[in-house]
Amino acid sequence: MEPWLSSLPSVPYPSPKQGYWLPVTSTINWCEEDYYATIYSAEIVNTITNLLFVVLALKGVINCYREGHDKIFLITFGGYAAVGTGSFLFHSTLKYPMQLVDELSMIYTTCFSCYSSFSYKRSRAYGFGVALFLISLAVFITAYYHYLQDPSFHQACYALLTATVLFRSMYVMEVNMRPSLKRREKTHAQHQAAGMVSEAEKREQRRVDERDERIVRTMWGMIAYGLGIFLTGYFIWTQDNIHCSKLRRWRHEIGLPWGILLEGHGCKSQHGLILLYMLIEISSRVVRDTGLGCDTYLTTLLTLRRHIMTGTGAYFYITWGVWLRHCLNGRQDEFELHWPSTFFSLPAVMRKRPVEELKTE
């Protein structure tokens, strides 16, 4: 730890207290020290930051009601809130039942997203078969995880389910949007050859094609951004315990409130993402100007980024799903993605309205 960091104005970390929820029964105990702030919360930073998951879920629910999105996304955002609530309870108590609420809510919410993706515009019989399979899968994961009590099993299942939903949605987007442009162009050329298309129809077809090409291009950019955030965060998530002893030592050296910035598991909101961006810029200059070691710099950044990115990436995926559903329903002229700033705002799907009206909201 560089001397200038230890010289920052701070207060020492309090001594651990006799926690209200003791003893710890969870199979995981994250790097944040237990019960140093209050007897009612084992990991105070990890606990409080989960409220921001609920805030983002509420933002999504309000957006669904206000803009008239499909009701299935109300359930999806409800599952997103359940993940944050379960994590709040888990980090508050470090009890095994609350750990199951936290981790299994992630599995169940992703299974529901699987059902939404695979059953869309399919027959009732097909949808029933998908639902039966996913319910059976969720029951198996629940039972086997309770038997193993190995967090790596949960992480592997969650990663596999998430990848399945993601790649399925990418496939649906390409097959139903980009190839459809080619099919329309082929039909358009045939009608043109037969003299069946008026000039007004040609102009409208060009407008529609250009619109859909722009949407697909923007969607891929959004996917790359959100997926990059999520995967980086998920990787950092798996690295949490590797540098734990070093991080705990650093926190005590720099004291509060600066030590909170090294609580990587708790940084998961968009506000945290903004803070992370500023910290990266500042710390990059520190590395350049003071010669801070690369190992120290990278370790700090990995810890800061972990849960910021998984939470933000999940929100991006849900928002992309809302927009994709409207496009698949042929409502591209009614809805658009509203994302004023890449780094300092979250995207939302909104009904198209005059620019002046958007500025007043």
Image (tube, rainbow, N blue to C red):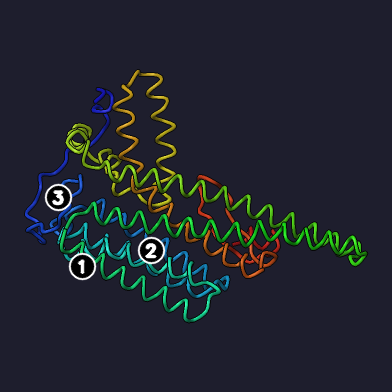
- The single residue placed furthest to the bottom in the displayed view is 124
Find disc 3 in the rendering and name its residue. Answer: 34
Find disc 2 in the rendering and name its residue. Answer: 110
In terms of depth relative to the viewer, which is nearer, 40 or 123? Answer: 123
| Residue 77 is at least partly visible in this image | no
Q: CA distance from mark 2 to mark 1?
A: 17 Å
Q: Are marks 1 and 3 in contact (CB under 8 Å)?
A: no
In the image, is 14 to the left or to the right of 224? left
Q: CA distance from mark 1 to mark 3?
A: 29 Å
Residue at image x 53%, y 59%? 320
Pointer 2 or 3: first along the chain = 3
Residue 295: percent from left, percent from top: 30, 26
- The single residue placed furthest to the right in the displayed view is 195
Residue at image x 25%, y 27%? 7
Q: State the quadrant of the N terminus.
A: top left
Find disc 1 in the rendering and name its residue. Answer: 143
Residue 348: percent from left, percent from top: 54, 59
What is the quadrant of residue 105 in the picture? bottom left
